Image: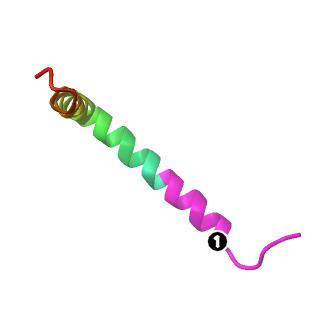
Amino acid sequence: MRRGGSFGWLGIGAAAVGLWMMGYGIWRGEMKVVLEKAINICMECIGIG
């Protein structure tokens, strides 16, 4: 059974934009910054750092 409308294309478009933004962030080096922040938060919650 097919749903009415073009919401399938909207989901595909949103996924494509999300993947493009992730790629752009990785290209800019943001992955390193996010990983460092995640490590700092984990160390503070555990109480090691």
* Helix, strand or loop: magenta stretch: helix
Give the percent coordinates (x, y) of residue 18: 44, 51
Determine whether 47 is above or below 1 in the image: above
Residue at image location 25% in from the left, 29% down from the top: 35
Name the foreground residue: 15 vs 35: 35
Q: Residue at x 67, y 65 (%)?
A: 8
Q: Quadrant of residue 31?
A: top left
Q: How is the image coloured?
A: rainbow
Magenta stretch, residue numbers: 1-16
Left of 7 or right of it: where is 22? left
Q: Position of residue 38 (x, y in %)?
A: 24, 33
Q: Which residue is mark 1?
A: 7
Q: Quadrant of residue 24?
A: top left
Amino acid on which the number 1 mark rests in the picture: Phe
Is label 1 in a helix, a strand or a loop?
A: helix
Taking 45 as reference, is 24 above or below it?
below
* Outermost residue toward the right in this view: 1
List x then y, in percent, for residue 44. Answer: 15, 31
Q: Is residue 44 magenta?
A: no
**Residue found 36% across the figure and 48% down from its top:** 21
**Magenta highlight on residue 9:** yes
Q: Quadrant of residue 33?
A: top left
